[in-house]
Every structure is written in structure tokens, then in C-alpha cells.
Image (cartoon, coloured by chain):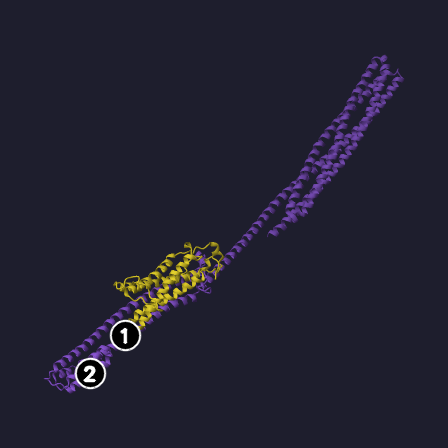
Amino acid sequence: MSLVADTKTSTSAAQEAQPHYAVRPYRLPAKIMHWTVASLVLFMVASGITMKQLGSGELTDFVFTLHKTAGAFILLLVVGRFCYRVLFPDRSWKAERYRRPYIHWLLYGLLLAVPLLGWAGVSDFGARDLFFGLSLPAILPQGGGWSDFLFESHAYAAFGMLVVVALHIGMAVQDHMTRSRWDAPEED
Amino acid sequence: MFPRSFRAQVGQRMAIWAGMLGFLFSLYATVEIIQTVRISNFSEKIAATATALKAHNASYNAYSQLARGMEPEASGKTVLLALGEIRDATKDEGIAKAAVDMAKAATALVPLALIHPERPKALQELVHARSEIEKHLIARVTESQEALAEMISHDRKNKILIVLLSMFVLGQILFLEYRWLVKPLSRMAVVLKRGRKFSQSLANEALRRDEVGALARSLVNHFALAKREEELSRIEKDKLSDRLSRQENLKRESAAFQARIGEIVQRLEEHAGQMAVASKDLLSISSNADERAAASAESTLRVSEHVDVVASSIDGIAATMTNVVAETERTSQVTALARELVQAANEDAHTLTESARTIETVIALIQDVASQTNLLALNATIEAARAGEAGRGFAVVASEVKQLATKTAQATEEIRSGLTGITDASTRIAQRVTRLVGSVEQVDQGAVTISASIREQHANSQTITTNTARTAENVRDLADTFRHVAGLIADAKRAAHLVTEVSAELGQQSRDLRASVDRFVASSTEVAA
């Protein structure tokens, strides 16, 4: 969730050459949502690839249901995170502080688009059942013949998201390496 | 988002990269394992189908014999065996069902004779069951082929995507680590090796929290320390050169001081010489004046004697009127002598005045010299003060010189006051002598008139008496004045002696001053060296 901070440094700070370890202020709910979504995304990738690789069978159906349930959960979490961000903005979330804010927006978009594509494919295909006796509402009429295309797009978008996630991780690490540039107060 | 202990240090970064790549590689491994398992399942299925097909084909002869009714028992048995083999191999419900049907048909067909009414139907059932089995087997093959093709396609897509993603992640890792680790380290190495100026990027890296940040910080500190040392050494060098230039200045100044002191001393010596000469002149002039004054006193004394003689003569005139003519003659002679003497006295007085004037010019010269000496002594004092501790010796000498100059001035002042007295006295002498001349003239005239008019003699003798008395008085005054002048001249002589002594001492002191200056210069040169 963190991006690279602006690298403009004051000369005096450079001359002092003394790092100070201010911690970026993310709230605990934001952190919990971030790491839940992150682990779920990894699980989704693993389960999606396994599912595809297994072909068909009972195990596949089980993994498929698990995939759908987790996807629905991710969708809820991402929407929740977004609402939380709007309601309680992160103190460091200022556009001028970020060199590449579009990565964040791209990640949010993909985190919404990939589950939605999957959901649409499932609706078209006609397999909307989840665990715990739940069922996804149909967002497309069943049997529209779009399911193959939708699933394919879902898969490619997911891989694209993994690329964005890799960039996101790299930038987060860079951000942490130069965290001393943040002057925001410590929290948690 | 990260725990607080995470500082993106190299080890922690490696762990993250390992996690990312490990995730991708385990995904790839999972895909590969599933693929392998599925391929082995497929190969088993295909092998079973092949076995079934082989049994099916092998049972063809028996089947055709059974159909034609040739050795039905044996061929029926063979067909049943083959059917069992097919069923066991495929474990397929459809095939099993078709095999059961065919077995039933075959069993039904075996006991029937060639021309049995039921035989065509049973044969038809047999053929149907066999074609059913065949269809199932072919469907099985097709199905396997399709599933295999789909599996392979999925597998390829998955693997390609995972490999592409891994390559991207690997590329990103290499790029970032090059930027974060390799480039800063090589930059620092360059900075350390070639002693280049450390850059702003190095200062930025010093803000990092990982090992590279620590390295950059220590490097920045090292450079700051080196810079400070350089500055200190520069200041030290400046100080040294400043001291050197100050020493040089001191040397130059002391040389100039030496030159100036030498000049002053030379002039002092000159002045002392001049003063000695002037005092000698003064002495000779005052001796001359003394002589003149003595001569004047003598002539005055003689005048007084003569006037007394005149007075007594006049008294005699009063007593002896008869001897008037002779007496007037004698008077004429006496007055002529007196006139001569008065003339001499007058001349002496003039000479005295002139001498006094000469003395005055000499005194002015001495005074001038004394004031200049005083000025020089003041200069010497100032220079001595500037020279500080080293100039203390000649400061004493300079003060001595100054005292001498002051004494000289005092002496000349005394001389001057004495001289004023002399001038006044000589002026008075001149006046009195003039008056004396007038009186003598009158006496002369009186004598002439006496010889001409004796009658008037009586009346006039009274006048002559008073005149003579006045003359005598004047002469006595004159003698007094001369004595006074002689005293003044003695004073002037003493003063001149003093001046001579002073100038001699001045010469000595200026020599001392030169010696002490030479000593100071020698010592200051040593100090400078």
C-alpha cells in the first residue's frame, strides 16, 4: 500500500547525514485489510493456476468453489478498504508526496476488475455457488457464450495484476529504505 | 505496512525477493507435478484402452467364426474371455454394459444351429453389441485425445505466464538491486579510490536505513572530517605566513629606525660641534668685551681724575683770578685731553654695543641648536618608545640629551638677560659720554670765553662749577656702569663655559646614543633571525 516518497531532500538533512526513523502513519485496520488482501491474492493466484491445471474433477470443483468464495471476500475487502480510505484518509496520502501514484490506482482498479471479470464469467457459465450455502448474484444472463472470453480475460488480468504487485513491492521496499525522509509522526 | 524492524536491509530485501521468486517457483513446481500426475493417468488410461482394443481386435476371428457358426463352443468361449479382458482393462461403465450385452448375445448364439429362426436376431444383437463396444472404445480414445490436448494447452499457458512473470520479477530484482546496491557501492568505491568530491547522490544515500546508508553516512562523516582538517591546516599555514611577514616588517622597520636614529645622532653631533664652536666664539667675544669694559673703566677712571682736576682747577680759578689766562690755557689743554679720552670712551661704548649684538646672534644660534636638540631628543624618545623593551637604553640617553638641551636653553636665557643689561648699560654709557663730550665742549668754550671776558668769568665760573660737578657725577655713574658691565660679562663668561661643557657632554651623549642604537639593532636582527 505504500509508495515511494518524494526523493527531494533538503540540503541540510543531507549534510546532517543522521537518519531519523519516523514511521509512516497507516492505521491498524488499514494494515489488517492490506495484508489480508495480499495473502488472499496470492492464494487466488495459486488456486486459479492449480484449478486450471487440474482440468476437471471433484478436487477441481472444490478448489473452484474456494476460489470463488475467496474472490468474493477480496472484492468485499477492497471495497471496504477503499471506503475506509475515503472516510479516514491516511495521513501520508498526499499526492505531492508520491512519485508514482498511478501504481496505487492501477492496483485498486485491477483488484476490482479481476474479481468482477471472474464473477461475470461465473454468471455466464452458471456456477455461482459458494461455500456455506451462499450463492453469488448473477451479473450477466446465463449462457451468453461469453464465459470462455471472460475467464481468459480474468486470467490475463490476474497475471497483469501480479506484475503490478511486483512493482508495488519494489516501490514499498524503496520507500522503507528511505523512510527517514518522512517527517510524519510515529503511530501504532 | 511493514513491521518496524524492517529497514530494507540487504538480508531483508533478499528474503523478500526469495519469497517472491519462491512463490513463483513453487507455483511452477505445482503446475509441473499436476501435469506429470495427469500425464501418467492419461498414459494409464490410454494403455488400458489400447489393451481393450487389442483384445477386441484379437477376438475378431473368434467373433466371425461364432457368427458363421463354425466351432461355436470354442469361439464363444474365446469371445467371452476377450470381453472379460476388455471390461477389466477399461473399467468403463458403458463398455462394461456393452460387453455384458455382447456376452449375453454370444451366449445366446452359441447353442443355436445355423438355420435356427432365432439365430438372425441373436446375430444382430451380437453385431450390435460389438459395434457398441467399438464405438465406446473409439469414443474413449477421442475423449482422451481431447482432454490431453486441453491439458497441454492449459499447461503451456500457465507455464508461459509463470515464466514470464518470474522473468519480470527477476529483472525487477536485478534492476532494483543494481540501483540500490551495486551503483552506490561502485560510486563510493570511486569516491574513495580517486578522492573525488562526494556527490549529492551520496548525501541522499546517507539517509537510507540499510547498510548502504550506514556506509554512505560514515563516508560523508569521513569527508567532513577531512575537510575540517584541511581547513585547520590552511589556517595554520596562513598564521605561519602572517608571522613571517610580520617578522619581515619588523626587520624592515628596525632597519629604517636604525637609519633614522643614525641620522638623528649625526645631526646631534653636528649640532654639538656647532654649539662648541659657538660657545668658543662666545667665550672669545666675552673676553674681548671684558677687555673693552676694563679699558673703558680705566679711561672713565682717568676721565674722573681729570674732571676732578678740572674741578679743583676751577676752584683754583675762583681763588686765583689772576692766573686766569694761564689757567685757561692749561684748561684748554686739559679739556683737549679730556675730549680725546671721552672720544675713546665713546668708541669703546660703541664697540661694546656691537659686541653685545654679536653675542646676541651667537646666543640665537645656540638657542636654535638647543631647541633643535630638544626636538631631536623628543624624536629619539618616541622612537625608543616604539622600539619597546629594547629601546629602553637609549630612552635614558635621549632624556639626558633633552635635559642638556633644556640646560643650554636656560644658560642662553641667562646670557641673553645679561646681554640685555650690557646693551642697556652701553646705551647709557653712550648717552653719558655724549653728554660728557658736551660738558667738555662747554668747559673748553668756557675757558675760551674766560680768556676773552674775564668779567663774565666770575658769573660763569659758577656755571662751570655746577657743570663740572655734574660732569664728575656723570663720570662716577659711568664708572659704576662699567663695573656693572664687567660683572655681567663675567656672568656671560661663566655661561659660555657652561655651554662649552654642555656641548661636550652632548657630543658624548650622542655617541652613547649611537652605540646603544647599534647594540639594539644588532639584538633585534638576532631576534628576527
Q: Which residue is mark 1?
A: B39
Point out the residue furthest to the right here: B319
Q: Looking at this view, is B450 or B359 the one in front? A: B359
For chain A, the rendered hue is yellow
First of labels 1, 2 by sequence position: 1
Q: Looking at this view, is B6 or A110 the one in front? A: A110
Q: Are marks 1 and 2 on the same chain?
A: yes
Crowding near the residue tagged with mark 2, few <14, some 14–19, many ≥20 C-alpha atoms within 10 Å: many
Q: Is residue B79 above or below residue B348?
A: below
Say what amino acid the circle numbered 2 marks. Ala
Quadrant of the rendered structure where residue A175 is? Answer: bottom left
SS for tag 1?
helix
Q: Chain of mark 1?
A: B
x and y percent of residue B116 in the render? 11, 84
x and y percent of residue B4 in the render? 46, 64
Say what amino acid the circle numbered 1 marks. Ile
SS for tag 2?
helix
Q: Which residue is mark 2?
A: B82
Query: Is residue B178 in view from this perspective?
Result: no
Per the model, the C-alpha gap separating discs 1 and 2 is 28 Å
Point out the residue furthest to the front here: B117
For chain B, the rendered hue is purple
Image side of residue B438 versus residue B194, left or right: right
Quadrant of the rendered structure where residue A138 is? Answer: bottom left
